[in-house]
Image (cartoon, helix red, strand yellow):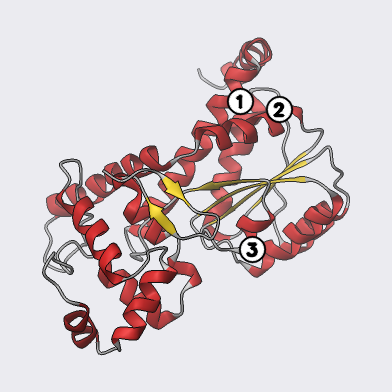
Amino acid sequence: MYNDAIASTGTILSVDLNQVIPNIRMRLPSLTRTEQSIAENFLKPHFLHKSTSIKEVAERLGVSTALIVKVSKKLGFSGFKQLKDALNAQHESETFLPNEQLQPDDSCEQIITKVLQNSINALTEILNFVDANMVSAAADAIVKAKNIELYAVGGSTIICDDFQHKLLRFGIRASVPRDRHLMLMSASVLTPEDVVLVVSHSGQTVDLMDAVRAAKQTGATIISITNNYHAELSQLSNYPLYAPASPEPLLGKNGTARLVKLAMIDSLYATIAGKIPETVAENLEKTTKAVDILHR
């Protein structure tokens, strides 16, 4: 079993067996397209065996052995051998269940099984990966904030909508600016007493980053939920929360990625509730009564 320790250089000296694959996934966005393609092959359960040589991998992928070594190091390992050994150790662990990709001839039953099993895998993965101290610190910042802004674009916007709704049930008001102009205006009038929570799978969406940089300049606290260790968003965040997910387009970044971010939001929401129980109990009663008239 590897220990959970990451050097300040970003190189994985040793890592918990359950964290090898999510650590690799969260480094994918920082790679070139060719490098990403190589790394995605590494993640396939039967691609690397204990006896697989670096020359064999290079020939199979049509690249140089030097590039294989380079990608291995970019993924946080000392070289190809350490990467191969770590992946094989995880694949052979009793708790490991590989994600399943949909096939053109899958039946409805097979599709449902794959979708739900991948969802279970994703939640298990983030459970092994989440930094509880970071979640607690982010919750403290939100509880103490004068104003709370929630930034996202595209499919991530619904995650901010969900969090806004949850916070309002506690009596905590938050805003979700709907476009780039509104986010920039919102960021320009923030203060060090305010908090911005940013949700972005890539951590490098242009529309978001302009507003995040502006918010950072005001001294506001930045909380982020992303899948990218090396993104500028992670570097600018006071409290970066990581939600690793498969890059696979159908069931990955458009499926389980949203699921794990919602799970992170739920964890943050419940942590907030534990920090202000009296306020939460009082306001939950008020907000529940307010909508009771609609349930008849």
**Is any atom of residue 293 visible in this view?**
no
66 to 147, vertically: above or below: below
Q: Position of residue 282 (x, y in %)?
A: 67, 10
Q: Residue at x 63, y 24 (%)?
A: 169
Q: How many marks?
A: 3
Mark 1 is surrounded, within 10 Å at the Cα level, by few (under 14), some (14 to 19) or many (20 or more) other residues, namely many
Q: Given contact means CB atoms under 8 Å apart, are the residues at marks 2 and 1 in contact?
A: yes
Q: Name the N-terminal-most of marks 2 and 1.
A: 2
Q: Which label belongs to residue 232?
A: 3
231 to 171, vertically: above or below: below
Residue under label 2: 143
241 to 251, vertically: above or below: above
Q: Quadrant of the N terminus?
A: top left
Q: CA distance from mark 2 to mark 1?
A: 7 Å
Amino acid on which the number 1 mark rests in the picture: Ile
Residue under label 1: 272
Mark 2 is surrounded, within 10 Å at the Cα level, by few (under 14), some (14 to 19) or many (20 or more) other residues, namely some
Amino acid on which the number 3 mark rests in the picture: Glu
Q: Position of residue 256 (x, y in %)?
A: 37, 51
Amino acid on which the number 2 mark rests in the picture: Val
Q: Nearer the viewer, mark 2 or mark 3?
A: 3
Q: CA distance from mark 3 to mark 1?
A: 27 Å
**Is any atom of residue 71 visible in this view?**
yes
Taking depth in this image into account, of 252 and 155 the one nearest to the observer is 252
